Every structure is written in C-alpha cells, then in structure tokens.
Amino acid sequence: MLKFICYPKCTTCQKAKKWLDDNNIQYELRDIKTNNPTLQELTSWYKTSGLPLKKFFNTSGLLYKSLDLKNKLPEMSENEMLTLLSTDGMLVKRPLLIGENFVLVGFKETYWENIK
C-alpha cells in the first residue's frame, strides 16, 4: 500500500489527499508533524526518488527560513542534511507519496497521474 505523508493543515496536502480519494487510490496516511520521518526512511526515500536532496526541504517553511538553511545547505554534507531533516517533519517538503519503487515529493498532478 502507498504511504501518504502529509501535514493535514497544509492546503497542498489537502488537495493531494482529495486527488487520491477522487481517484480511488488506497493509501496509509501519516501526519508528518506527529510522526516525523526517520533518518533511515529519509535516506531510503532520497535514494529511491532520484531527486536532488534539496528537493526534500520545505523551502517555504518558517523553520527553514529561521534556520537560514538557504545559506547553510550548500555547505552541508548529504548526511548532515538528512540528519537535519529527520529532526523535524516541518522541514520536509510535503506531501510525500511513497510506493514500492517510487517517491513523489510535493503535489504535481501531472507526476501523480503516473501512479494510477
């Protein structure tokens, strides 16, 4: 079953959830704020996604901005970035949709269409 990791108060996550429901796609819902992804999960998802690690950061979030990560990330190693992401779910871009062989970060309907 797909894992849908979101922040329920986020409007983009709400749109993604509605899209999943409207398309009769079954998933296991996980609140990223109360059940933060682990370092092991993030490492696995990052490798499966094929995306640059920076794509996993919620760059519009208050925490990202308050920590000045825009300027700090370029100096950090992959392990340091993954460890930081694992400390607080609000740093992680959402929603995440995780399947057996794919990881989608953020909600873009055109990318999500491929999972049907």
Image: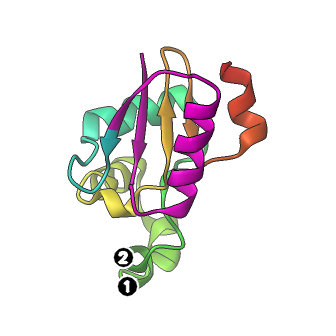
- Residue occupying image coordinates x 40% and y 63%: 9
Magenta run includes residue 58: no
- Residue occupying image coordinates x 40% and y 41%: 5
How far from the left and from the top, in percent, is residue 56?
Answer: 50, 51
Magenta run includes residue 8: yes
Q: Is residue 77 above or below residue 30?
A: below
Q: Where does the C terminus fall, quadrant-wise?
A: top right
- Judge from the rendering whether residue 88 lies leftward or rightward of residue 67; answer left or right: left
Residue at the disc numbered 1 = 66
Q: Kindly tell me whether residue 50 is visible in this rendering.
A: no
- Judge from the rendering whether residue 4 lies leftward or rightward of residue 37; answer left or right: right
Q: Where does the N terminus fall, quadrant-wise?
A: top left
Residue at the disc numbered 2 = 63
Q: Is residue 3 above or below residue 84?
A: above
Give, as a single range, the part of the protein colored magenta.
1-29
The Cα atoms of the two marked residues, 1 and 2, are separated by 5 Å
- Judge from the rendering whether residue 87 lies leftward or rightward of residue 45; answer left or right: left
How far from the left and from the top, in percent, is residue 47?
Answer: 49, 30
